[in-house]
Amino acid sequence: MSGGGPTRLAARVVAWALVVVLAGFVAFCGIWRAQGGRWERVETPSMGTVAPVGTLLWVKPVPFDTLRPGDFISFHPPGRPGVTFSHRVLARHADGTLSTKGVIPAPDPWRLGPGDLVGAVRMRWWGAGWLVTAAPLLILGMLVIGVVRTLLRPALRLPVTVVLVAVVAGLALAVYRPLDSAVQLGFRTVAGGGADATYVGTGLLPVRVDAVAGDHVVLAAGQVGRVHVPVADATGHFRVRLSPVIPSWFWAGLVGLCFAPALASTVRRRKNICDDMSR
């Protein structure tokens, strides 16, 4: 009689649960699309913490006349059908047109009509837009990993897969830089000396903005902060340094991933020993 029955049953239950969840999600996306819904990736920091860079917006068509100030909408600026913005409605005017505004910048210079509307934002998935951006690279990497796995002996599949997954993930992080980044919004010299620099965080992790020989500020995704650079360097430039602020949970997760292969190997070895003893 062979052991491991409960373990195999649990693995099958988990596998089928994942299949059901994935199938349900695909069906939901299909229904969303069939009802005219679409997805938009936030690529600029204009909406601040409401929808930071990398957010995936779920946008659904709505009647233009139902929109009110404060509604979060996606639209094409007048005369630019190939460009999509996602801002809040600022005001509805007597002629029926709408004016819009992001969180950070000044009000938009246009007025929207019914033909400019894409839809209203119904859901915001923080960070999911980065996955969409990196999807071609990640899918190609998974295909390569799948091919490599078929060429390996069973004992080598797990460690090689872990290494290849790390390589693909590292390549995606290096190419798209979703974790630590910030965009400069403004820079101005100060009459009393030095300069003020304004930044907004655009990465998934907080970023620290250090003014050389000055103060610093830590910015989460979509947050705006200002630092004062008191003096210029020898070349006459005011220097600012950006560095990631990595939280403890990120390190804990990374360490856990590093030990996952060893843990899986230990569990598998103990299972094999139990199977041999039960025969």
Image (cartoon, grey):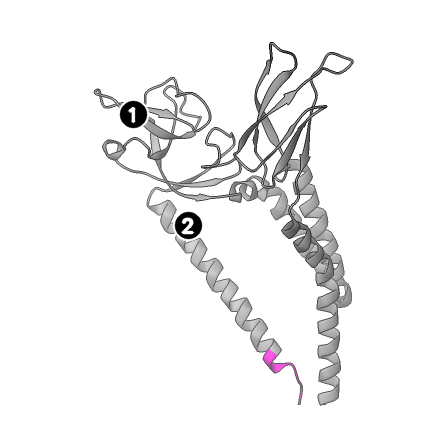
As shown in the figure, which amino acid type bears the numbered disc 1?
Ala
Which residue range is magenta in the image? 1-6
| Magenta stretch contains residue 233 | no
As shown in the figure, which amino acid type bears the numbered disc 2?
Cys
- Badge 2 density bin: few <14, some 14–19, many ≥20, Cα 10 Å: some
Nearest to the eye among marks 2 and 1: give it.
1
Q: Which mark is residue 55?
A: none
| Magenta stretch contains residue 3 | yes
Q: Secondary structure at mark 1?
A: strand
Residue 173: percent from left, percent from top: 66, 41
Per the image, the residue denoted by label 2 is: 29
Residue 86: percent from left, percent from top: 41, 31
The answer to which of marks 2 and 1 sits earlier in the sequence is 2
Specify the quadrant that holds the N terminus: bottom right
Q: Main secondary structure of the magenta part?
A: loop
- Badge 1 density bin: few <14, some 14–19, many ≥20, Cα 10 Å: some
Determine the residue positioned at 47% across, 28% down: 46
Foreground of the two, 108 or 218:
218
Specify the quadrant that holds the C terminus: bottom right
> Residue reaching furthest top?
191
Per the image, the residue denoted by label 1 is: 91
Residue 255: percent from left, percent from top: 71, 56
Q: Secondary structure at mark 2?
A: helix
Where on the picture, by quarter, is residue 37? top left
Residue 270: percent from left, percent from top: 73, 77
Determine the residue positioned at 36% across, 50% down: 31
